[in-house]
Amino acid sequence: MRRFMRPLIVGLVLLILLALPVTAVLARSYFLSPTWQPAAEQPIAFPHTRHAQVAQLDCEYCHRGVAEDGYAGMPALELCMDCHQSIQTGSAEIDTLIDYFENGDPVNWERVHQMPDHVHFVHSSHVNYGFDCAECHGDMESEIDYAEQVRDLRMGDCIDCHKEYGAPTDCSVCHY
């Protein structure tokens, strides 16, 4: 009996030592997943609803790469200034926009929808399939004034959606 105790204790200690890092990685992946990231403060408070309702701009007007590229892209300041050279309400936000433009500085927008570095989300394939932007981004046209993450972007959410719409669930589709 005694000769079995030593290997058993060593085995249990090794198992515990191996289980701790695995548990830490899994806990980190779950609790620090994109859903748990707080909404970042933007350099300019951009009211999506005003641009969608009043100016009647659709998502693709500003996010021009969404149908062709993997990344939806952010509009160049020149695009914003096409309208805001003549539409100036004197608001602090528009004044900030004009300052960026006149100084030749880029607006350093903070990413809102976080995906892990090892995941490659391709906007164009989803948009060209027929998904409306609101599926993942919420109703930016009438309900959400400022961008915030509204959907759980953990792997289970993506897999459930892929299964629901008959899209491939092979690992290499998103992880490459």
Image (cartoon, grey):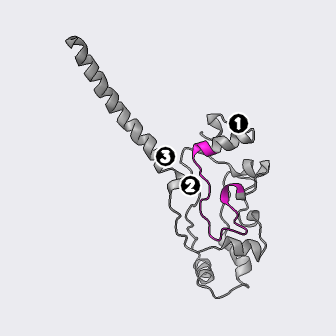
Task: Give the magenta range.
Answer: 135-157
Question: Which of these two is toward me, 88 or 100?
Answer: 88
- Residue on which disc 3 sits: 30
Check the image and name the residue furthest to the bottom.
90
From this viewpoint, is residue 79 visible?
no
Instruction: Give the x, y percent position of residue 133.
Output: 72, 58
* Quadrant into which the N terminus falls: top left
User: In the image, what residue occupies the spot 30% across and 25% down?
Assistant: 12
- Residue on which disc 2 sits: 114
Q: Is residue 65 above or below residue 104?
A: above
Labelled disc at residue 168: 1
Q: Is residue 108 above or below residue 175?
A: below
User: In the image, what residue occupies the spot 75% across and 38% down?
Assistant: 166
Instruction: Give the x, y percent position of residue 71.
Output: 66, 54
**In front of the other: label 1 or label 3?**
3
Q: Earlier in the sequence, mark 2 or mark 1?
A: 2
Badge 2 crowding class, 10 Å Cα cut-off, few under 14, some 14 to 19, many 20 or more, is some
